[in-house]
């Protein structure tokens, strides 16, 4: 197999409207369609087949990095086919690869049928907006749509720091500085340190992985920038705990104070398969108000969920249970799927008994 074969496979991902392509030895190539893996009707691949195909897509420098570390993350754009995020790795000594489609046309919030509150949140001049969820939950797409909305309506300098750069925005009203970790900057923390000297209005951090990056993001949000970031957490209150827990005990009171003043919102989303075809994003939305800020500052994060249930009028807040109920009621998803993805299945089961 050759470079032309891998291009044909990647074209099939786009043609079938799949999200991912997996190449793993002793298996046929696999597409992820609406969240489920489906084999392509082709012969099983060997590690050598995968190596021949995948090396055709990368530079000698990238090949050297992969052979030294057995891991490689990068983004590529194939003319006439599309843009992809790729990860090369090894399994039982053989090369394997996963490719994720990145739409070249950045979606709008309307395209995603996003909750109306998102358009209000992005009007903030400063603060921290987090979009969280497991891998493959559409975090990057939601953030790209938010930045796209700003790009259509405001004149700002937007600095994005990602590993690798995914959505590439065309300058409309805004100007973008896209920075890839490993290519354009050494690390997330380094990029954030120097971003302050690049006169940004808005900063996107592809992943808040470590203490240094999280601290820099909170400082940037406190000092007059609108900061967007992601974490691999499944609930809004859980996201706040994750950030606090990164820091040592004596640092936590100060961090809680910083979060209480700078956190604008947490959107914790999951992508669920719809009844017919396609997927839908169920989002738990926490919007910081005076009551929630006090709970964060006073180390009462465990009470935030109750506050989210009670303080919804006019805020755009919703729990994941409410989002799932709405999708069940409008016929988008079935009850069994909702229960599988629910953070609080007992609460959802009780709510379903009332309908």
Image: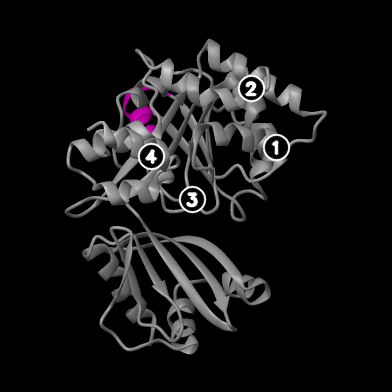
Name the residue carrying label 2. Answer: 300
Element at label 4 = helix
Based on the displayed image, in which of its 4 quarters is residue 108 positioned? top left
Work out whether residue 77 or residue 204 is closer to the camera in this orientation and state it: 204
Q: Residues within 10 Å of mark 3 (few under 14, many from 20)?
A: some
First of labels 1, 4 by sequence position: 4
Name the residue carrying label 4. Answer: 142
Whether residue 139 is visible to the viewer of this picture, yes or no, is: yes
Element at label 2 = loop
| Residue at point 42%, 81% (across, down) | 53
Element at label 3 = loop
Q: Is residue 246 above or below residue 129?
A: below
- Check residue 296 for magenta coloring: no
Q: From the image, which quarter does the C terminus lie in?
A: top left
Which stretch did the figure color magenta? 143-155
Nearer to us: label 2 or label 1: 2
């Amino acid at each position: 197999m050759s470079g032309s074969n891998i291009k044909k496979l990647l074209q099939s991902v786009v043609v079938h409207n799949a999200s991912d392509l997996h190449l793993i030895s002793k298996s046929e190539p696999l597409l992820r369609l609406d969240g489920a893996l489906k084999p392509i009707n082709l012969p099983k691949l060997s590690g050598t087949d995968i190596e021949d195909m995948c090396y055709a897509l990368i530079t000698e420098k990238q090949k050297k990095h992969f052979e030294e570390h057995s891991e490689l993350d990068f983004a590529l754009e194939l003319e006439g086919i599309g843009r992809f995020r790729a990860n090369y790795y090894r399994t039982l000594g053989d090369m394997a690869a996963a490719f994720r489609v990145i739409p070249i046309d950045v979606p709008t919030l309307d395209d995603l049928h996003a909750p109306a509150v998102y358009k209000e949140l992005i009007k903030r001049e400063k603060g921290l907006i987090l979009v969280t969820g497991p891998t493959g939950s559409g975090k990057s797409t939601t953030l790209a749509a938010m930045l796209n909305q700003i790009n259509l309506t405001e004149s700002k300098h937007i600095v994005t720091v990602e590993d690798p750069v995914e959505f590439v925005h065309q300058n409309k009203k805004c100007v973008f500085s896209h920075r890839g970790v490993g290519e354009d900057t050494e690390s997330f923390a380094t990029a954030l340190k120097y971003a302050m000297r690049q006169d940004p209005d808005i900063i996107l951090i592809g992943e808040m992985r470590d203490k240094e990056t999280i601290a820099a993001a909170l400082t940037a949000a406190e000092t007059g920038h609108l900061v967007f970031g992601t974490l691999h957490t499944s609930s809004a209150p859980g996201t706040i705990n994750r950030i606090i827990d990164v820091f040592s005990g004596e640092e936590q009171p100060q961090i809680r104070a910083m979060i209480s003043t700078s956190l604008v919102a947490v959107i914790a989303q999951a992508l669920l398969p719809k009844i017919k075809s396609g997927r839908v994003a169920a989002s738990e939305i926490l919007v910081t108000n005076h009551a929630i800020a006090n709970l964060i500052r006073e180390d009462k994060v465990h009470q935030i969920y109750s506050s989210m249930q009670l303080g919804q009028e006019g805020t755009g807040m919703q729990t994941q249970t409410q989002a799932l109920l709405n999708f069940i009621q409008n016929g988008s998803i079935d009850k069994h799927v909702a229960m599988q993805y629910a953070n609080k299945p007992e609460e959802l089961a009780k709510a379903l008994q009332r309908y």
